[in-house]
């Protein structure tokens, strides 16, 4: 796996508090941030998969005979 540097600005107080919180869990800030990033990417992938499934299910319902109102059924 190749690595890249991710640089961003953050309030110094937040950085210090985050570093202390990470240290209290025997982790580095970088370890926690990488974990947060992995979790976020996984969550977005799951949302995308669910959205595709939902759209397919809706289309199946729309394509079913008599699915639309006004199709002669009352």
Image (cartoon, grey):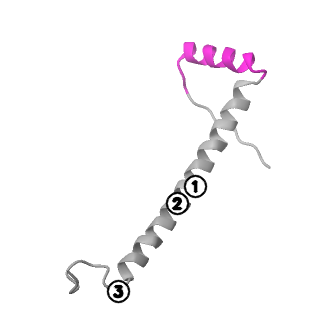
Q: Which residue is mark 3?
A: 65
Q: What residue do we see at 35% from left, 78% from top?
A: 62
**Side (left or right) of 58 relative to 11:** left
Q: Residue 17: x, y in percent?
A: 61, 14
Q: Which residue is mark 1?
A: 46
Image location of residue 60, percent across then percent down: 43, 78
Q: Secondary structure at mark 2?
A: helix
Q: Does 15 sit above or below residue 50? A: above
In the displayed structure, 6 sits above or below 51; it is: above
Instruction: State the SS at label 3.
Output: loop
Task: Indicate left or right for 22 with 71 as reference.
Answer: right
Q: Which mark is residue 50?
A: 2
Residue farthest to the front?
74
- Is residue 40 or residue 63 the one in the foreground? 63
Are there few (<14), some (14-19), or many (20+) residues within 10 Å of tag 2?
few
Question: Residue 7's image quarter?
Answer: top right
Classify residue 12 by image quadrant: top right
Q: Position of residue 69 (x, y in %)?
A: 23, 77
Whether residue 60 appears in magenta in the rendering, the answer is no
Q: Are marks 1 and 2 in contact (CB under 8 Å)?
A: yes
Q: Residue at x 70, y 25 (%)?
A: 29
63 versus 29 height, above or below: below
| Label 1, label 2: how far apart the Cα atoms are | 6 Å
């Amino acid at each position: 796996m190749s690595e890249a540097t991710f640089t961003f600005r953050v309030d110094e107080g937040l950085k210090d508090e985050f570093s202390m919180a990470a240290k209290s869990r025997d982790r580095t800030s970088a370890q926690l941030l990488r974990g947060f990033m992995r979790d976020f990417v996984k969550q977005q992938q799951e949302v995308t998969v669910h959205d595709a499934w939902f759209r397919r299910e809706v289309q199946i319902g729309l394509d079913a005979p008599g699915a639309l109102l006004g199709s002669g059924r009352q």
